[in-house]
Structure formats: C-alpha cells, structure tokens
Image: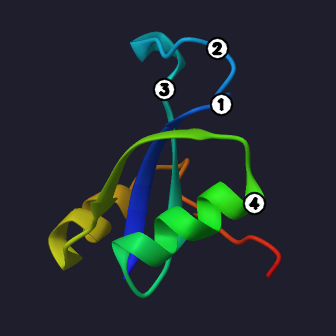
Amino acid sequence: MIFKVFFQPSKEINPRRENTKSLYLEAESEVEAQKIVEAQTNYNIEFLEGLSPKALEYEQQSPHFKITEFNK
C-alpha cells in the first residue's frame, strides 16, 4: 500500500503548519511505514494516510509525486 506521510523536517523545532512537508512511501502497514520513516530520518511525523486507489490516482497527477525509497 502507498502511504502519504506528513511530517516536520526536524524533531528539534516546534511544529508549524507552514513547515509541514509530505512524502509517499510503500509499506505493508501504517505501523511499518512509521517504523521505516523513524529509523531512516529525524522527521517528526504528524500523520500517516493510507491512499485508496482513487486517492493514489489523484496524487499521481501531481508533478511532485515520487515514491520515496529508503535503504534497508
């Protein structure tokens, strides 16, 4: 499943809506997606959203759509 992960770039700075970024990640479950991001980054995860087929289709239309792959 593809997840859209909303995050703050650093855990050291107080979260601000203006700093929220997102990435797309393929994982088996929401828990796995969270573990991958936490193990590979210093991001402060705000929200994980599993994308339905329709939502994924919509997101893929964005020129910024790219599935992030982390080293395992």
Q: Which residue is mark 3?
A: 20
Numbered badge on residue 65: none
Residue drawn at x 46%, y 11% is: 16
Q: How is the image coloured?
A: rainbow
Number of other residues with Cα within 10 Å of mark 3, as a class: few under 14, some 14 to 19, many 20 or more? some
Pointer 4 and pointer 3: residues touching (CB < 8 Å)?
A: no
Say what amino acid the circle numbered 3 marks.
Thr
| Residue furthest out toward the bottom | 28
* Sequence-first disc among 4 and 1: 1
| Res. 38 image quadrant | bottom right
Q: Which residue is mark 1?
A: 9
Pointer 3 and pointer 1: residues touching (CB < 8 Å)?
A: no
State the separation of the CA atoms marked 4 and 1: 12 Å
Coordinates of residue 69 in the picture (x, y in percent): 70, 72
State the separation of the CA atoms marked 4 and 3: 18 Å
Number of other residues with Cα within 10 Å of mark 2, as a class: few under 14, some 14 to 19, many 20 or more? few
Pointer 1 and pointer 2: residues touching (CB < 8 Å)?
A: yes
Q: Which residue is mark 4?
A: 40
Q: Secondary structure at mark 1?
A: loop
State the separation of the CA atoms marked 3 and 2: 12 Å
Say what amino acid the circle numbered 1 marks.
Pro
Say what amino acid the circle numbered 2 marks.
Ile
On the rendered structure, is 57 left or right of 35?
A: left
Coordinates of residue 47 in the picture (x, y in percent): 34, 45
State the separation of the CA atoms marked 1 and 2: 9 Å
- Looking at this view, is 57 or 4 the one in front? 4
Q: How many labels sit on residues? A: 4
- Looking at this view, is 5 or 59 the one in front? 5
Q: Which residue is mark 2?
A: 13
* Sequence-first disc among 3 and 2: 2
Question: Which of pointers 4 and 3 indicates the residue nearer the eye?
Answer: 4
